[in-house]
Amino acid sequence: MGLVIFAAVVAPRVVLGVMWYSGSRVDDAFNGWFVPLLGLIFLPYATIMYVLLWSANDGVRGSQWILVGIAAAVDVILTGSRLVPKKQYET
């Protein structure tokens, strides 16, 4: 179980880092480096979804924001689940 949680926490950051390093899509979607860096640290799923949905003509628009919002909710849930103290089970 710990490995699954570790993968859920680390994998999106690795994917976003590789996307940022290997291509120009992240640079095209954001102006500058500060906002993607914050996304890499705090909201990696939402940042990946924003980059994937962003287009040069329209940016992110309409119902696409719902998908970005769902990804942000996943980020918040994963962060919250790490902050909740674990119960000690009696044997």
Image (cartoon, rainbow, N blue to C red):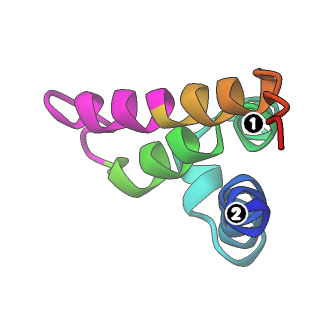
**Mark 1 residue crowding within 10 angstroms, few (<14) / some (14–19) / many (20+):** few
In this view, the residue in front, 33 or 79, is: 79
**Mark 2 residue crowding within 10 angstroms, few (<14) / some (14–19) / many (20+):** few
In the rendered image, the quadrant that contains the C terminus is: top right
Q: Helix, strand, or loop for circle 1?
A: loop
Q: For residue 75, which numbered disc appears in the image?
A: none
* Residue indicated by mark 2: 1
Residue 47 is drawn in which quadrant? top right
Residue at the extreme front: 91
Q: Which residues are magenta?
A: 57-73
The percent coordinates of residue 58 (x first, y second) are 25, 39
Give left or right: position of 82 versus 68: right
In the rendered image, the quadrant that contains the N terminus is: bottom right
- Tag nearer the camera, 2 or 1: 2
Residue 69 is drawn in which quadrant? top left
* Residue indicated by mark 1: 32
Residue at the extreme left: 63
The percent coordinates of residue 36 (x first, y second) are 71, 40
> Which amino acid type is shown beneath numbered disc 2?
Met
Give left or right: position of 30 versus 58: right
Residue at the location (81% across, 31% down)? 34
The percent coordinates of residue 73 (x first, y second) are 46, 27
Q: How many marks?
A: 2
In this view, the residue in front, 60 or 14, is: 14
Residue at the location (82% across, 22% down)? 85
Residue at the location (51% across, 39% down)? 46
Mark 2 or mark 1: name the one nearer the start of the chain: 2
The percent coordinates of residue 22 (x first, y second) are 72, 78
* In magenta stretch: residue 86: no
Give left or right: position of 19 versus 69: right
Q: Helix, strand, or loop for circle 2?
A: loop
Residue at the location (76% across, 21% down)? 84
